[in-house]
Amino acid sequence: MRRRPFHQHQEWQSLAVLTLIAIALLVAHHRARAGRDGSRADRVARAVLMPLQETLVVIWERSAHTAGGLTRARRLTQENARLKAENAQLEARLIQGQELRNAYREALEAFGLKPLTGADEIPARVIGSSTRRFIRQTIDLVSLDGREVRKQDIVLWNKFLVGRIESAQGGRARATLLLDPDSGVAAVVQPSDVQGALVGPDPGARDAGLLRLVHLERDAPIAVNDKVYTSDLGEVYPKGIPVGTVEEVIGGAGTAEPKTALVKPYADFGNLTYVTVFRPEAP
Amino acid sequence: MLFILAHVAALIAGAALQRAWPQGLRLGNVAPDLVLVLVACAGITRGRVAGYAAGLLGGFLLGAAGQGHYTAVVVGLMAVGFLAGQVRGTVFADHVLVAPVVALLATLIAAVVQLVVSPPSHFLPWLGEVGKLAVYNAAASPLAYVWARALARRWPPRAEA
């Protein structure tokens, strides 16, 4: 029998070693999967990738800003005059807004409720996101003021619910979006007060951006344009965070399908650049 | 040793760039799979073992970043790296146009692995997404190939040096 050349043995030995490393990594990952943080090796990889992502996003933003500024250079003078007029109007609206905010706080206090205060809100920049529809829908974010982000913190976009932090390392974190197939939020529909579970969209649907409100009574009085908020039934999110509006109601009484409301989220998931991380009070 | 560092650095940068790919440059919410393209190019230019190793590192990075099902990504990229390594040494391997073809095939191989390991809930929409991804990967591949070929010429494999 002819002996195989040495370099071939070496190649298969290398392949075998690499396969063993792969198996070890997979086992470590799946053993640590319950916590969503991944294995230690995963955390090290994220600690290397996230600062790089942050740098790339900043470079991209600055390049886009510079390119946009150059193309708009001719219009800047006219725009300046228009902005001055707009500024005066906005200042007036700001004063009006402040008055409304005070009235809102007074009303909440009258009902014994606590407003969302700025002290628990951490501004954050989105530095990465899932690049396909048929994979887990997550975003990577970094705190802008250096404050620590924690697992289970809530992510908002303009006060609207976006998702929840699933793993965090200092000021950097990964959040599961409402669009994730595994996402689940206890929700309440207003004005009917119907409770349900808001789950991720059907990835095969025509509009894959619509969340599904399920576990509804067959004759639940839900109508198009009803508002959906978080409820405290799930004990994960504080109640009252706006999520979206009912876009369509399918199934229910008189049909074979269970009643499901398709909810259009307020958050613009295709345009998440900056978000707010909110830490609810411990129960 | 330096070529290994160069490939590792490229894979890390590729994984970060893929995850941070701007929304405005996505093709129907699909960004190119830069790591897959880099793994395929490492395989074409340096052979099966290098492709396999690049697939392992690339899959580990993407899996840790949450970019797909961990097992499917690792196994898929290792398979891609190994199979792309089979192309090395053929008459076509030194032509830049081999890169888009290999990138197309690599996307399909990774998709088949995903189909087996973590089947999607809806086949046809998923297939459409794979099609977009394959086109985007093919478009991105020549640049990665030129870079990988330059590395292979600068530091040729031991047998050819």
Image (cartoon, coloured by chain):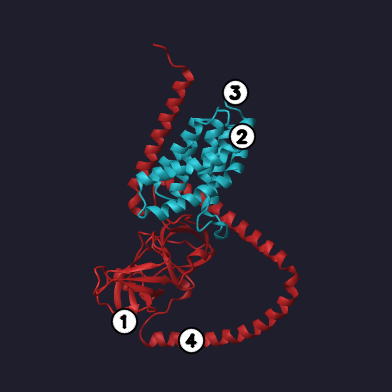
Label 4: few (<14), some or many (≥20) within 10 Å?
Answer: few
> How far apart, in angstroms, are the residues tagged by discs 3 and 1?
75 Å
> How far apart, in angstroms, are the residues tagged by discs 4 and 3?
76 Å
Label 3: few (<14), some or many (≥20) within 10 Å?
Answer: few
Q: Colour of chain A?
A: red
* Element marked by disc 4: helix
Q: What residue sits right under mark 2 in the picture?
A: B95
Q: Colour of chain B?
A: cyan
Q: Of the residues shown, which amino acid type is indicated by label 3?
A: Glu
Q: Which numbered circle lies on residue A192? A: 1
Q: Of the residues shown, which amino acid type is indicated by label 2?
A: His
Return the x and y of residue B62 as percentages of the image width and height: 46, 47
Q: What residue sits right under mark 4 in the picture?
A: A102
Chain of the residue that carries numbered disc 3 in the rendered image: B
Apparent side of residue B111 relative to residue A223 in the rendered image (left or right)? right
Q: Of the residues shown, which amino acid type is indicated by label 1?
A: Ser
Q: What residue sits right under mark 3 in the picture?
A: B160
